[in-house]
Image (cartoon, rainbow, N blue to C red):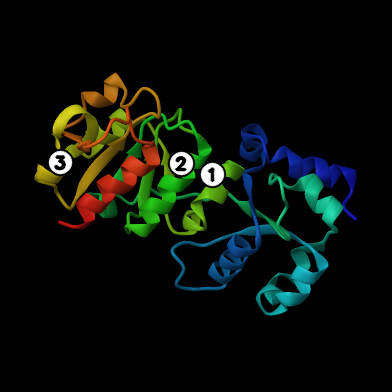
């Protein structure tokens, strides 16, 4: 049985304010939990993981003793009612893990020799998480979020990544300054009236700007673009979801 104070603390992590205060975040569900535990014990994992606590149902804990063995001191068994109290999911899924937020150094050399996504005011946590998952799929190691993007540690973001947060580094930076610091790289962005994506000369090492769901790329970032591209439409839809557009653009770049 968890104390009221502990339940209050865990619920506070649903808020960005308290995630920042405690420098923690929450990941939930069997699939993500297993991936976290495997990564935490893998010396070749993309980056190190620090687990604060594991809250699981009795059966889940019993069924995963091999993975949980190194973490016995931080495991707390909870019942369904308690898991529901601390979960962000409508239907809680067996286990909840509290982790320390990552502290990454900007990998300058890696950015100069790869694709990097720049997210300009993406507001929906689900879109952000899906874009991180897309980056993971296409082997894009770094995602740069504008200072007014959705929070990369929002529970909805973490859930939507499907584990990609364990391999894709996210940073929260001023995008215009970032572009100036990497001025040698071409900067692509999808805008209406841009050049057909599939007829544009693409560079394997580049910055790709993804604009806000409703407003598109901000005026400040439009000025940073060196290549304005457009995904050609064959139907009548007014626009594409930001994450879907990201997937199409990344596929074009990765199939040069």
In the rendered image, is residue 113 in sight? no
Q: Which mark is residue 231?
A: none
Q: Which residue is mark 1?
A: 157
Q: Quadrant of residue 221?
A: top left
Question: Residue 146: image x %, image y %?
Answer: 40, 32
Going by the image, does 164 lie left or right of 195? right
- Looking at the image, is mark 3 or mark 2 earlier in the sequence? 2
Asked if the residue under mark 1 is in contact with the one under mark 2, i.e. CB atoms within 8 Å, the reply is: yes
Q: Which residue is mark 3?
A: 184
Quarter of the picture holding the C terminus: bottom left
Q: Which residue is mark 2?
A: 128
- Which secondary structure, mark 3? loop
Q: Residues within 10 Å of mark 1 (few under 14, many from 20)?
A: many
- Which secondary structure, mark 2? helix
Question: Residue 102: image x %, image y %?
Answer: 52, 51
Going by the image, does 172 lie left or right of 59? left
Q: Residues within 10 Å of mark 2 (few under 14, many from 20)?
A: many
Which residue is found at the position 86% from the left and 43% from the top? 5
Q: CA distance from mark 3 to mark 2?
A: 27 Å
Which residue is found at the position 89% from the left and 43% from the top? 4
Question: Residue 36: image x %, image y %?
Answer: 58, 64
In the rendered image, is residue 186 in sight? yes
Which residue is found at the position 17% from the left and 41% from the top? 197
């Amino acid at each position: 049985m968890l104390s009221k104070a502990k339940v209050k603390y865990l619920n506070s992590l649903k808020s960005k304010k308290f995630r920042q205060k405690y420098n923690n975040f929450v990941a939930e569900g069997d699939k993500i939990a297993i991936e976290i535990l495997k990564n935490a014990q893998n010396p070749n994992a993309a980056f190190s993981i620090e687990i604060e606590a594991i809250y699981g149902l009795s059966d889940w804990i019993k069924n995963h003793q091999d993975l949980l063995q190194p973490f016995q001191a931080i495991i707390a068994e909870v019942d369904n009612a308690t898991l529901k109290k601390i979960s962000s999911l409508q239907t809680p899924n067996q286990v909840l893990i509290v982790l320390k937020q990552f502290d990454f150094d900007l990998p300058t050399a890696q950015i100069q020799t790869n694709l990097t996504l720049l997210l300009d005011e993406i507001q929906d946590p689900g879109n952000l998480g899906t874009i991180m998952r897309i980056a993971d799929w296409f082997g894009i190691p770094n995602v740069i979020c504008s200072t007014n993007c959705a929070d990369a540690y929002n529970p909805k973001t973490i859930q939507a990544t499907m584990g990609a947060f364990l391999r894709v580094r996210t940073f929260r930076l001023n995008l215009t300054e970032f572009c100036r610091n990497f001025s040698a790289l071409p900067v692509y962005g999808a805008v209406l009236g841009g050049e057909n994506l599939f007829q544009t000369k693409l560079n394997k090492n580049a910055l790709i700007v993804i604009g806000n769901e409703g407003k598109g790329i901000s005026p400040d970032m439009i000025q940073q673009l060196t290549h304005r591209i457009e995904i050609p439409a064959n139907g009548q839809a007014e626009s594409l979801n930001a994450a879907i557009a990201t997937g199409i653009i990344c596929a074009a770049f990765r199939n040069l």
